[in-house]
Image (cartoon, rainbow, N blue to C red):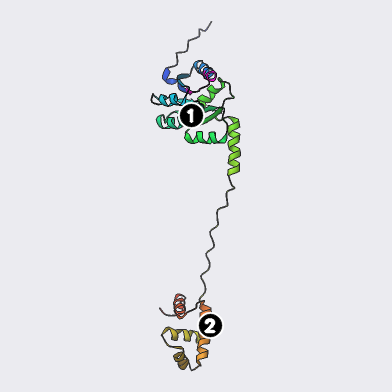
Amino acid sequence: MTLESTPMPPRSDCARIHIVLVEDDENVLAALSSAIASTPDMKLVHTAGTRAQALALLALAPADVLLVDLGLPDGSGIDVISAAQQAWPSCAIMVSTVFGDELNVIRSIEAGASGYLLKDSAPYAMMDEIRSLNAGGSPISPLIARQMLVRFRQDSKPLAAPAQPAAPSPASAPATLSPREHQVLELITKGFTYDEVAGLMQVSRYTVMTFVRRVYAKLEVKSKAEAIYEARLQGLLEP
């Protein structure tokens, strides 16, 4: 028994990947156009050979994939990428160029390109890259990918270990005052002069001043007001 082959139904136009080519090299344009025409799941809808022509195409219905050369005779293809990103936000954009320098790569990606291919691939091999781009991938020539990895390694720095929270410093222990030092502190806090304190404590004025200097040193202050404030803060005096 022989099996008759059933012809495949023609692919509907809406199911194909609609492509716009922006390329000023006639030979490259002809080769890519031929490859797309012979690929059942793709359709070339428009071509442009200049920056001005490409920008004019953006007023039409959006394509699925925009393949852009950077070195156009009247300007940079990066301008086309940037404009297409605004006019056709659903369109996937890929660069096809001879320029592999870091500046053009970075600027193209910042403008909105999702893929970057050097013109070193056979036209038919690029059809797989177009499918990948349309499916959400980001095709990049190996040379460009390696260049970007080198740049990343040069710019990146080792991540610093997270800083450990500083251990809370223990609360300073209240100054330890002798009974006589404490008595002097209480008296000067109440407003007594050194001579009055000397009379109340029945010591010389010189002795009172010695006690005061000791109190200042222990409280780490330099004035009567600071001494009173610090002593109250440490609970050595009643508020």
For label 1, the residue is 75
Residue 214's mark? Answer: 2
Magenta stretch, residue numbers: 21-29
> Does residue 118 lie above or below 2 as drawn?
below
Can residue 135 be spotted in the picture?
Answer: no
Where is residue 179? Give x, y as percent: 50, 86
Residue placed most toward the observer, 91 or 176: 91
Position of the C terminus, as image quadrant, is bottom left
Where is residue 144? Give x, y as percent: 58, 32
Q: CA distance from mark 1 to mark 2?
A: 83 Å
> Does residue 239 lie above or below 38 as drawn?
below
> Does residue 216 lie above or below 129 as drawn?
below
Can residue 172 be spotted in the picture?
Answer: yes
Residue drawn 43% across the image and 83% down it = 189
Q: Determine crowd level at label 2: few under 14, some 14-19, many 20+ residues with C-alpha closer than 10 A.
A: some
Quick one: label 1 or label 2, which is nearer the N terminus?
A: 1
Residue 46's mark? Answer: none
Would residue 24 be counted in the magenta stretch?
A: yes
Residue drawn 51% across the image and 22% down it = 24
Where is residue 53? Give x, y as percent: 44, 23
Assign a secondary structure to mark 2.
helix
Type of residue at label 2? Arg
Assign a secondary structure to mark 1.
strand
Residue placed most toward the observer, 46 or 54: 54
Residue placed most toward the observer, 207 or 11: 207
The residue sitting at the front extreme is 74
Where is residue 220? Give x, y as percent: 52, 76
Residue drawn 58% across the image and 36% down it = 148
Q: Answer whether labels 1 and 2 touch (C-beta < 8 Å).
A: no
Would residue 200 be counted in the magenta stretch?
A: no
Query: In the image, which is nearer the foreground, mark 1 or mark 2?
Result: 1
